[in-house]
Image (spheres, rainbow, N blue to C red):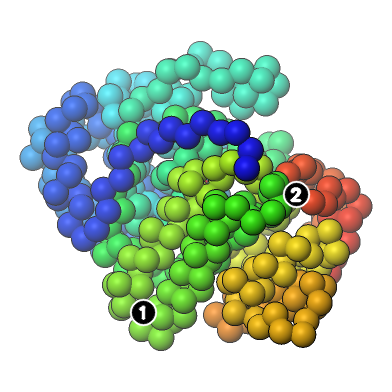
Amino acid sequence: MNTFTYKYPVTVYFGEGAAAKNLPAELEKVGRNVLLAYGGGSIKRNGVYEELTALLTAAGKNVTEFSGIMSNPTYAKVQEGAKLAREKRIDFILAVGGGSVIDCCKIVSAQAGLEEDIWRLENVEHGGPAAFIPMGAVVTAFGTGAEMNNGAVITNEAEKIKGPLWGAFYDFAILDPAYTMTMPMRQVISGAFDALSHCMETYMGAPREANLSDEINEACQRNIIRNLRATLKNPQDIAARSELVWAAAMGENGILKIGKATDFQAHMLEHQLGAYTDCNHGQGLAVIHPALYRHMLPEAAPQFARLAVNVWGVSPDGKTQDELANAFIDALSAFIREVGLPTSFSEMGIPEETDYKAIADSTVLTGGCCKKFSHEELLAVLNECK
Ligand code: NZQ
Ligand code: ZN
């Protein structure tokens, strides 16, 4: 195991009724001017907006709304939020939504107090923001685990880059599985696959030998697979949904990363696919993962073989390590088909004329894994995904 420091700053309020129980006390700690941030309006259709605005009113808050945060949030939207936060002298941001709203607000919180452009500060000057508007997250779509970390994935349309910006951690996150019950099934499935992907990408990093973080990780993967299957059988299964919401949070709360390097090569590639096509994140990952992993044989064979046995229940009897590694990729591919995720970019509706070379060439090459990809090989992966 590598040396590590573990400190975790986000208070998690989990369970049905968590907002009514905990938000009033949290609101007492913050100033009067609150930015209520949300997406395209799902919270107005499922009662979450009404419940939260009633709690904000009861707490005597002066609420400014910041709405219309799109999936794959843009840098322009971040700047719109930061301007609003400055103008309205916002004391506290309540972000209500999935990864897109939660990510956008992390950077609004940082940009609002900065004179300079945060994209330039972080990516050109390699500095970082020092002051943030405090924030709370109310999760309505699980999967990304964005509420648990301080990284945000933002699309800079001018630069054609969907990349990370670093903001603050949320002071608290409210995870009420009931709030996620109105998610469209397509998003439930892609959110669950995203969570599974985070586990796998973390697993692939060094050290590669069996270790406690990876053994907890294997349990998370089994849990996501089992509970997505249960959810597909009965979409109203709140027990299965609760497990999925927490398993997704576990993927990004740092516990699986303790003592490890991580490798997010599938994510880096999918993010650039998103920069060029604005595609759904979990769906893009589902198409990329099996193709990318076939390119990682034989380097990743020991880890793939462990996943075959410990996560996918493949019997090791009479099988070589390579056979088991192949069985893992086969099981993952079969699961992707079983749950109705796409298996090609064309199935996702991505146009044939997409500039895959530009996507491959602009993808960050990660170094955490057993195999270091080149841009040329990533282009080969993308071509196999078409
Ligand atoms: O915008 P509204 O109307 O709210 O609709 C949303 C949106 O259309 C809908 N939705 C959310 N909660 C709902 C609901 N619909 C009905 N009932 C509810 N309770 O779901 C749609 C998708 O929401 P979005 O937030 O875009 O999805 P997701 O949570 O998958 O977030 C995706 C973004 O997160 C980034 C992705 O790249 C992408 O930009 N990621 C962030 C990460 C992080 N910060 O750690 C890690 C991930 O790897 C990921 O890259
Ligand atoms: Zn992801």
The 10 Å Cα crowd at callout 1, few under 14, some 14 to 19, many 20 or more, is some
| Residue found farthest to the right | 376
| Picture residue at 37% right of the left edge, 28% below the top | 84
What is the CA distance from the residue labelled 2 to the residue labelled 1? 36 Å
| Picture residue at 49% right of the left edge, 65% below the top | 219
- Residue 357: image location, x then y, percent: 86, 53
- Residue 91: image location, x then y, percent: 28, 24
Name the residue type under label 1: Pro
Residue 141 falls in which quadrant of the image?
A: bottom left
| Picture residue at 20% right of the left edge, 52% below the top | 18
Query: Which of the labelled discs sits on residue 235, or is there none?
Result: 1
Name the residue type under label 2: Cys
Q: Is residue 24 left or right of residue 335?
A: left
Is any part of residue 1 visible from this angle?
Answer: yes
Which image quadrant: the N terminus? top right
Q: Is residue 319 left or right of residue 238?
A: right
| Residue found farthest to the top | 115
Query: Which of the labelled discs sits on residue 369, or is there none?
Result: 2
Residue 241 falls in which quadrant of the image?
A: bottom left
Count of numbered marks: 2
Q: Is residue 296 left or right of residue 36?
A: right
- Residue 249: image location, x then y, percent: 43, 53
